[in-house]
Image (cartoon, rainbow, N blue to C red):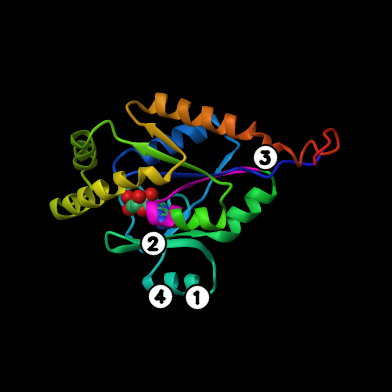
Amino acid sequence: MKKEKGLLIVLSGPAGVGKGTVCSALRSKNTDIQYSVSATTRKPRAGEVDGVNYFFKSHDEFQTMIANDKLLEWAEYVGNFYGTPVDYVRETLDRGQDIILEIEVQGAMKVREAFPEGVFIFLMPPSLAELRKRIVGRGTETAEVIDARMTVAKEEIDLMKMYDYVVENDAVELAVNRIRSIVTAEHCKRVRLIEKYKELVEVE
Ligand code: 5GP
């Protein structure tokens, strides 16, 4: 039987909603989900490792990646550039493995154009007050950056209407279980399985 192609899963949500935490918790439970490491011109935060959290690039290096078609999508976000290296995504899907991209909304919509069969999940904060608390609590950003991120966050929340699924991050464990259920259900969709079972089923 032909192997299914992997699922391309996009996880977006306003900064501070806990995408990183939810993503790591998901990956520790589903070790077969690969993670797409983005390139960025943002400076590393304390504890961030090059090649693990991001590929940290200079502006020039980032522009070269764009010029050489190395990015599936890219976007400017609060003064920095972020982009998804395309080769790793394609190789992973072709191997039949699932991959998760943790990216912001503009980039996600570009990915949708290239991969309409992707699964687009929006992570929602329980409230705006809670979101601000989480951004402030992270303690890595200046007051100015926090305000800029809150403004962008409000605009981003409005774009949840572009997504297939909305998952509230009221508690990490609950959010992870919701995402795991979505992934399981998506794998069972008939349209994804037609190819796999084509020797067993008569398809018009
Ligand atoms: P942060 O600076 O907090 O790590 O990320 C800022 C925003 O950029 C987050 O919403 C994050 O999901 C998004 N982001 C990270 N990598 C990418 C990427 O490759 N492409 C796009 N479009 N957004 C990204």
Nearer the observer, disc 3 or disc 2? Answer: 3
Whether the residue carrying mark 1 lies under 8 Å from ligand 1 is answered with no
- In percent of width and height, residue 104 lies at 38, 51
> Can you identify the residue that label 4 sits on?
60
Task: Assess disc 1: are there few (<14), some (14-19) or many (≥20) residues with their C-alpha within 10 Å of its C-alpha.
Answer: few
**Residue 52 appears in the picture as rendered:** yes
- In percent of width and height, residue 171 lies at 34, 26
Q: Which residues are magenta?
A: 97-108
| Nearest the eye: 93 or 191 | 191
Q: Does residue 85 appear left or right of residue 20 in this picture? A: right
Nearer the N terminus, badge 4 or badge 2? 4
Secondary structure found at label 1: helix
Secondary structure found at label 3: helix
**Residue 50 appears in the picture as rendered:** no
Task: Assess disc 4: are there few (<14), some (14-19) or many (≥20) residues with their C-alpha within 10 Å of its C-alpha.
Answer: few
Whether the residue carrying mark 2 lies under 8 Å from ligand 1 is answered with yes
| Nearest the eye: 140 or 88 | 88
Task: Assess disc 2: are there few (<14), some (14-19) or many (≥20) residues with their C-alpha within 10 Å of its C-alpha.
Answer: some
Q: Quadrant of the N terminus?
A: top right
Residue type beneath disc 3: Arg
Task: Assess disc 3: are there few (<14), some (14-19) or many (≥20) residues with their C-alpha within 10 Å of its C-alpha.
Answer: some
Nearer the observer, disc 3 or disc 1? Answer: 3
Q: Which mark is residue 75?
A: 2
Nearer the N terminus, badge 4 or badge 3? 4
Residue type beneath disc 4: Asp
> Can you identify the residue that label 1 sits on?
67
Nearer the N terminus, badge 3 or badge 2? 2
Q: Does residue 23 appear left or right of residue 90 in this picture? A: left
Contact (CB < 8 A) between labels 4 and 1? Answer: no
